[in-house]
Image (cartoon, rainbow, N blue to C red):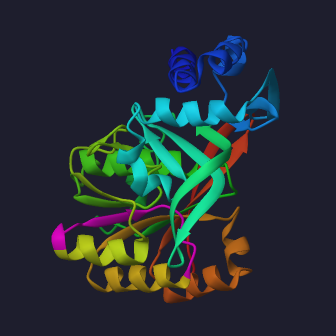
Amino acid sequence: MQEDLNILRYADAAACLPARLKKAALALPEAQQAVAEEFRLRAGQAMTVVLPAGEVPLGVFVEPEELEALCDLATEFSRYAATETLREGYLPVRGGFRVGLCGTAVMKDGVNTNLKNLSSAAIRIARERPGIADGVAPRLFQSGDLASTLILSPPGGGKTTFLRDLVRRLSEGVEPYGPRRVSLIDERGEVAVMYRGEPQMNVGPRTDVLEACPKALGIPIVLRAMNPQVIAVDEITVREDLRAVSAAAGCGVRLLATLHAGSVEELRQKPLYAALLEEGVFRLAVRIGRSGGRRTYAVEELPC
């Protein structure tokens, strides 16, 4: 059943492609379609599909004009309406997909205002994994309340997918603790995948999404405006994020955040993340691993 859904999601992602490239994408064997993660398009190079084993050429070379056509299809021929995200290097697509773009930045007063002469694109085949957080969520409660939690894995390890499902689970309610109001700071638009104000991914009925806003700015906004019980963010990367997270913790809000790290020990070896541990804001970590071709989720106590 899940494999069939994955194949359908692959076909939906391929629908963003110009006709010639779409035909090549759909010629991929279904067993590979079910596990595909991205399409990669580079002008003058073969289009590839990213599989767990790496990038595989699809036997067709990408013309520069096809990158422009891709943007028209992704924006439903309303590219002007997507200016805000285009200047950030991506386009949200109906159905929960995201097109990342590279080209020539159009700079004005030191700020990128657009992209032109597109040179490459990546279509992420976003897939939900409903239920992957169900067994973990109850273990994140201590003394009757949610413990602030980090989600750890190397790049591509499934952090965002797990965070999305954990947000959904907390928003719906974890027995016997009940539902929580969650504010999701979706800076890169990859968790809820908003399209014209509506999440394309299931993030739960009590989740409020602030998209395309830096975490350091977004956290104070939702604290003032939404009265959250939980704030969720994807990928803490800069010191300003740490300050905002610490301030939110001081207001009694619980936090969920993802980090690029394979273990707690690896966190300690990186100055920024070591400082995060020293703050003592987060009490637990969910470490995502892989065993027998399947992802595993281990809950660990963080040092106080």
Magenta stretch, overall SS: loop
What is the span of residues highlighted in magenta in the rendered image? 225-238
| The quadrant where residue 30 appears | top right
Give 155 or 12, whichever is nearer the viewer: 12
Q: How many marks?
A: 0
Seen in the picture, residue 107 relative to 274 is either above or below; the reply is above
Q: Position of residue 243 (x, y in %)?
A: 44, 86
Seen in the picture, residue 154 relative to 33 is either above or below; the reply is below
Seen in the picture, residue 270 relative to 51 is either above or below; the reply is below
The residue that appears at 25% across and 70% down in the rendered structure is 222
* Residue 129 showing in the rendered view: no
The residue that appears at 66% across and 71% down in the rendered structure is 264
Q: Position of residue 253 (x, y in %)?
A: 29, 74
Give 111 or 288, whichever is nearer the viewer: 111
Q: Position of residue 19 (x, y in %)?
A: 60, 16
Give 93 or 226, whichever is nearer the viewer: 93
The residue that appears at 44% across and 81% down in the rendered structure is 281
Seen in the picture, residue 261 relative to 129 is either above or below; the reply is below
Q: Is residue 237 magenta?
A: yes
| The quadrant where residue 110 appears | bottom right
Q: Position of residue 279 (x, y in %)?
A: 50, 88
Q: Is residue 73 magenta?
A: no
The residue that appears at 56% across and 74% down in the rendered structure is 302
Say whether residue 104 is left or right of residue 220.
Answer: right
| The quadrant where residue 239 appears | bottom right
* Residue 65 showing in the rendered view: yes
